[in-house]
């Protein structure tokens, strides 16, 4: 029996083969995304500290080796123009470019290009070669440099060596060891050139559909980083391509001028590859074992060098493809363009009367100027044109804009600047980094914390539920994807968060006013230290929880607190960018965004709850403990009784689980609620006992969640819930404290 790697054996297979639960029940709610990247999976050890390893790195030696690599052409993959720069820049850009601001997922922060599906996306064709070229260097420096950092740094060194003055480099991207299954890449089952029907809802009205790309997606096709280089569905239309580019780059958090700078700057280098229409072999994930994780075997000619096939387009943008210049924009505006086909049959533009002075990468002959359909978008779209034309005669302007946009592209998924490592971190701060002021005072002492907690609990108009809800609202904007959000900065007191429905703005105001009074009084009195609103918000939640633990609980509990948060200003808070931190649902507070669009509108409430838990980097037991505790504390967004399955709300009990699992209650869906709301009645009398949502009942319905819920409902469950809730709560409050970790 011959086994072809990556293909299924005919009969059942060992190691998880055969027909699985997922095959039987494709729509079952899965908790897999809460079990990713567990420390036990890390070959470097559960307590590997990348920052410490990076501190031992010979950074300059590494950069020198990367620079030397650029011009050390290898026989197994000869370098175009004798320089791997273009290839490495494309690798870095495709690594960072999967980032979407909408949900903060994707991006270059985890070294995901090494794993499926990204390693086998058509758009990443032959980037397996780029990573393999880096292997000797990775091998030499070991765990002191992550693959994630190395891929970005290689792009930087290529750009610098070829003449772009960059802003710098921040290390700190920690490798993962498996595919990140939390990223929604779309629902299609085919790759580009098909694979975009669902994200556009079947529409082929290219002008209308561009901006309606299903959220949170940023790419126009399954298997592309951004847009089809031949224009929407290979229509060859640059104007329509511009609309796709605007949506795709916008979803990456880039404005029009950053977009033009990135494309005009990136395509100053290298070339595209479409030597022939010969079909390529399977991508790495489906390639035969002996190919050793390399894919896209090319049977045309030598299979590489001048015979390389990657995208199928065959374009050389600049007369100096290994040197930073304005060659791209000059060519774009100074030539007349005709739509032609590459040798592989892909649509592209050629200047038919242009001079043959664009160098062939290998044979010392020269070609006419060529461009991608998407490149022409920078000339045919009026807004892009105004920006691009200005830079034709302002090379310095393009250089500055490209350097800034490249830094943003490659760092915007890294979160706070306190995560950046290494000697090349720029001093300058950018608004997209969600900047925080320096702490000017030592963190408040434990004695002060106790004084403040006592004052908070006596403050007018607040109660356990509101204090807990506000602290949760402040910390729970964190997203593990791009490490944005969290309690530090107290941005819950600023726009747009202060107005979000999920934060119950009226109640939030009362709590913020009370806490601000306490803060002002404390700071007026104290000379040695000052308390921030951000710290007080978390401390208030902690105080409320400590006060809500019933006296009968056989454990003395203090909620851990890490002081030292600072308060951001509105000027340092871009409301448009922070709007993306609004969760599409917060099942923890039993809220669902009625106006959510895209894939979220289609997702079940319970799937959105698991999704949120994943962004908060929670495990399944942490998710269960937090929801049960928050419901018992009455910290639901609207202060309703829905989901609060307890007769004594505001007390940290295990009542939610005891009552949910009580067989004397019978649940039915409320008519007209679309299966979202439920009523629980006494089995014998029919009397209404409880109201609930899907984000409540899922803890009794989904077998694995139910198994955990039982633990909190059984003997010893009260003590266990208090201990586990407090631990998980403290974890959420500190998710963004990279400044102390
Ligand atoms: Fe790029 C290349 C597309 C953007 C950089 N690009 C390339 C290609 C294509 C493309 C198709 C070819 C591939 C082959 O090889 O075949 N892009 C594209 C598109 C876009 C872009 C569609 C959107 C519009 N790029 C971009 C950016 C950047 C870049 C943004 C940066 C910044 N690319 C690049 C480079 C290259 C490319 C560097 C070259 C590579 C070599 O040389 O190899």
Image (tube, rainbow, N blue to C red):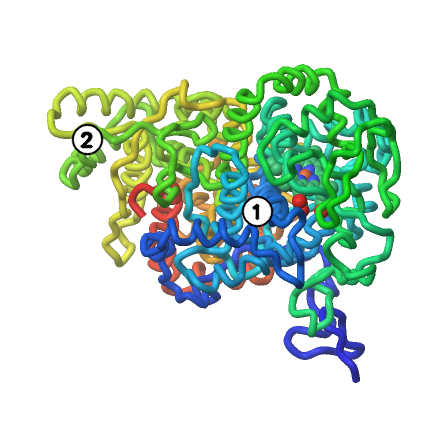
Residue drawn at the location 44% of the way across and 63% of the way down: 140
Is residue 215 visible to us here? no
Residue 558, image x and y in percent? 25, 49
Note whether 524 is above or below 1 in the view shown: above
Residues packed near mark 1 inside 10 Å, few (<14), some (14 to 19) or many (20 plus): many
Note whether 218 is above or below 281 in the view shown: above
Note whether 114 is above or below 517 in the view shown: below
Residue drawn at the location 66% of the way across and 20% of the way down: 388
Note whether 453 is above or below 287 in the view shown: above
Residue drawn at the location 77% of the way across and 29% of the way down: 241
Residue 738, image x and y in percent? 35, 43
User: Which of the two residues, 139 or 430, is positioned nearer the viewer here?
Assistant: 139
Residue drawn at the location 81% of the way across and 25% of the way down: 207
Q: Which residue is mark 2?
A: 441
For this orientation, the residue located farthest to the front is 364
Is residue 244 visible to us here? yes
Picture quarter with ligand 1 = top right
Element on which disc 2 rests: loop
């Amino acid at each position: 029996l011959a086994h072809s790697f990556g293909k299924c054996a005919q009969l059942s297979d060992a190691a998880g083969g055969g027909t699985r639960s997922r095959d039987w029940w494709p729509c079952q709610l899965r908790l897999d995304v809460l079990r990713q990247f567990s420390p036990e999976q890390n070959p470097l050890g559960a307590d590997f500290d990348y920052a410490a390893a990076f501190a031992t790195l010979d950074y300059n030696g590494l950069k020198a080796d990367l620079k030397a690599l650029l011009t050390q052409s290898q026989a197994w993959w000869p370098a175009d123009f004798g320089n791997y720069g273009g290839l490495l820049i494309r690798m870095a850009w495709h690594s960072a470019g999967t980032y979407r601001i909408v949900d903060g997922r994707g991006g270059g922060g985890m070294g995901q290009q090494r794993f499926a599906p990204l390693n086998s996306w058509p758009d990443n064709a032959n980037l397996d070669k780029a990573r393999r070229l880096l292997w000797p260097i990775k091998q030499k420096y070991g765990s002191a440099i992550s693959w994630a950092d190395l891929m970005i740094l290689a792009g930087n060194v290529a750009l610098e060596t070829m003449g772009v003055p960059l802003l710098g480099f921040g290390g700190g991207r920690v490798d993962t060891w498996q595919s990140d299954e939390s990223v929604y890449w779309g629902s299609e089952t085919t790759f580009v050139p098909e694979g975009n029907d669902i994200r556009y809802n079947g529409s082929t009205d290219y002008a209308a559909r561009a901006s309606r790309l299903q959220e949170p997606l940023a790419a126009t096709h399954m298997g592309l980083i951004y847009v089809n280089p031949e224009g929407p569905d290979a229509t060859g239309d640059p104007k329509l391509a511009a609309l796709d580019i605007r949506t795709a780059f916008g979803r990456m958090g880039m404005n029009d001028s950053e977009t033009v700078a990135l494309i005009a700057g990136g395509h100053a280098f290298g070339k595209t590859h479409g030597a022939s229409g010969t079909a390529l072999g399977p991508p790495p994930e489906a390639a035969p074992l002996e190919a050793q994780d390399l894919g896209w075997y090319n049977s045309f000619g030598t299979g590489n060098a001048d015979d390389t096939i990657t995208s199928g387009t065959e374009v050389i943008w600049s007369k100096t493809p290994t040197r930073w210049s304005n060659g791209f924009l000059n060519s774009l505006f100074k030539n007349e363009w005709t739509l032609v086909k590459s040798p592989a049959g892909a649509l592209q533009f050629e200047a038919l009367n242009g001079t043959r002075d664009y160098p062939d990468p290998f044979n010392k002959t020269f070609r006419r100027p060529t461009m991608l359909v998407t490149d022409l978008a920078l000339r045919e779209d009026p807004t892009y044109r105004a920006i691009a034309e200005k830079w034709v005669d302002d090379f310095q302007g393009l250089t500055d804009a490209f350097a800034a946009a490249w830094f943003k592209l490659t760092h915007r998924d890294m979160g706070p600047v306190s995560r950046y490592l290494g000697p090349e971190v720029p001093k300058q701060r950018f608004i997209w980094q969600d900047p925080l002021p320096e702490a000017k005072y030592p963190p408040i002492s434990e004695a002060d914390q106790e004084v403040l907690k006592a004052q908070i609990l006596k403050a007018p108009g607040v109660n356990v539920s509101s204090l807990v809800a506000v602290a949760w609202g402040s910390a729970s904007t964190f997203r593990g994807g791009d490490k944005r959000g969290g309690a530090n900065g107290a941005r819950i007191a600023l726009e747009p968060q202060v107005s979000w429905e999920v934060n119950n703005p009226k109640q939030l105001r009362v709590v913020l006013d009370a806490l601000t009074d306490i803060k002002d009084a404390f700071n007026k009195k104290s000379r040695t230290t000052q308390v921030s609103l951000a710290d007080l918000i978390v401390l208030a939640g902690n105080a409320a929880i400590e006060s809500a633990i019933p006296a009968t609980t056989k454990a003395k509990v203090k909620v851990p607190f890490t002081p030292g948060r600072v308060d951001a200003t509105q000027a340092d808070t871009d409301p448009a960018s922070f709007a993306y931190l609004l969760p599409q649902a917060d099942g923890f507070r039993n809220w669902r965004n009625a106006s959510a669009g895209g894939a979220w509108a289609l997702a079940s409430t319970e799937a959105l709850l698991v999704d949120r838990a994943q962004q908060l980097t929670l495990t399944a037991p942490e998710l269960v403990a937090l929801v049960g505790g928050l419901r018992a504390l009455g910290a639901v967004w609207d202060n309703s009784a829905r989901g609060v399955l307890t007769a004594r709300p505001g007390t940290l009990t295990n009542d939610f689980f005891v009552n949910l699992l009580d067989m004397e209650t019978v649940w039915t869906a409320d008519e007209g609620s679309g299966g979202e709301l439920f009523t629980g009645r006494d089995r014998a009398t029919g009397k209404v006992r409880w109201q609930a949502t899907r984000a409540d009942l899922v803890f009794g319905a989904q077998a694995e969640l139910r198994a955990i819920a039982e633990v909190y409902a059984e003997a010893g469950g009260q003590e266990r819930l208090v201990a586990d809730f407090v631990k998980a709560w403290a974890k959420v409050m500190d998710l963004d404290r990279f400044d102390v970790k």
